[in-house]
Image: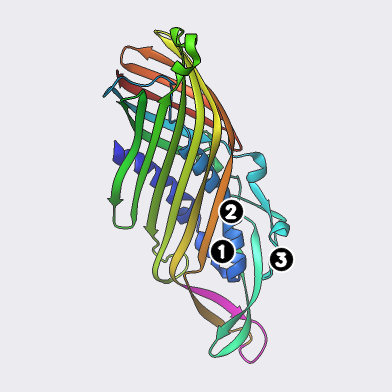
Amino acid sequence: MKKIILLMLLCFMTQFSKAQELESILLAAREDANKLTAAYINPAMNGLIYGMNSGWYHTAKVHKKLGFDLTIGFNASMVPTKDEIFSFADLNLTSVTSTSSPTSATVAGSGNGATLTVSTDVEYQGNTQNVSTTLEMPSGIKGDLPLSAIPTPALQLNVGLPLKMDAMIRVVPEINTDDVKGKLLGIGLKKEITGIFGPLDKLPLHVSLLAAYTSMDVSYAMDGDIVPGSNQRAEFDLSSFTAQAIASLNFPIINVYGGVGYTGGNSSLKMLGTYNLDYTITGGPFDGQQAIVPVTDPINMDFDTSGFRATLGARFSLGFFKIFGDYTIQEYNTLSAGMAFSFR
């Protein structure tokens, strides 16, 4: 099951980059290539962070000492309409001379990407040469995403500790295949504080504080089919954190739960290795000739996001088997659902 969960994440992380031919963006000047890549990929990074911070609880009540539950959940972060496209005019590009459209789809958008004409200076045979080419931005993959949202599955173990606390952990040991590897670690703590409210502890109401942190690293090797080269690989690093005050009304069959708090995180993308870019020389004694220009480690960028969140959900209990679902209002609204096997 752990491998299935991480493989689902790996499939998404590689789908929007490997299948969508991000390497073609490298034909723009390096600074422009980083801007275009960031504009295209930013919704996926944000969606993953908001999703990784979701689904941590389905009740505010903690387990008895050494009681535990195993939760299998799925989070779907909805990308706002404004983040489904981006405008080239907002990027202040210097090497792009024309575009087939003023906007293009992000990874979370729909439709084909725009075609760009590029003109830039490169070092070629010891001289600075002006070169030109065209590139096509990657298409959006909204139609291929479950619920048209950024998915983040989770497998979580919660264990009761003394002092009315639960330890929470999400762990997937490193997985290696021929071209993809990745690992995930999430840790959290839930502390019930119902007792400080006096008579309220006689009611089915439970109140807790929760904090959690998750990190995920994914790396995959590229085959060089789009842009020839050597040692090509992409590396994704994501980390997220959340702190929340949560409450639940627990009844024998159903409980209603919710919470408010803060969520955030940061991520990075690196495209490493050598990429041999194919241009046409414009002007000078080599006018019209092909120029192959190698670039090394061309992409290195960071992303971050944060904001407040509010969650409302419900859980149904059939003995030790639970089914839950909730909705979180935040910058990327998130739907979470799953099942749990709980042993108090």
Q: Amino acid at mark 3?
A: Ser
Q: CA distance from mark 2 to mark 1?
A: 10 Å
Q: Are marks 2 and 1 in contact (CB under 8 Å)?
A: yes
Q: Amino acid at mark 2?
A: Tyr
Name the quarter where the N terminus is drawn. top left
Image coords of residue 303 (percent x, y): 55, 53
Which callout, 2 or 3, points at the residue further toward the start of the chain?
2
Q: Is residue 27 magenta?
A: no
Q: Amino acid at mark 1?
A: Ile
Q: Going 61% across and 38% down the picture, which residue do you hit?
A: 331
The residue that disc 3 covers is: 98
> Mark 2 Cα within 10 Å, few/some/many (few <14, many 20+)?
many
Q: CA distance from mark 3 to mark 1?
A: 15 Å
The residue that disc 2 covers is: 40
Which callout, 2 or 1, points at the residue further toward the start of the chain?
1
Q: Which residues are magenta?
A: 275-286
Q: Are marks 2 and 3 in contact (CB under 8 Å)?
A: no
Which callout, 3 or 1, points at the residue further toward the start of the chain?
1
Residue 25, numbered label: 1
Q: CA distance from mark 2 to mark 3?
A: 18 Å
Q: Nearer the viewer, residue 19 or 196?
A: 196
> Mark 3 Cα within 10 Å, few/some/many (few <14, many 20+)?
some
Q: Going 33% across and 21% down the picture, which residue do you hit?
A: 63
Image coords of residue 191 (percent x, y): 41, 27
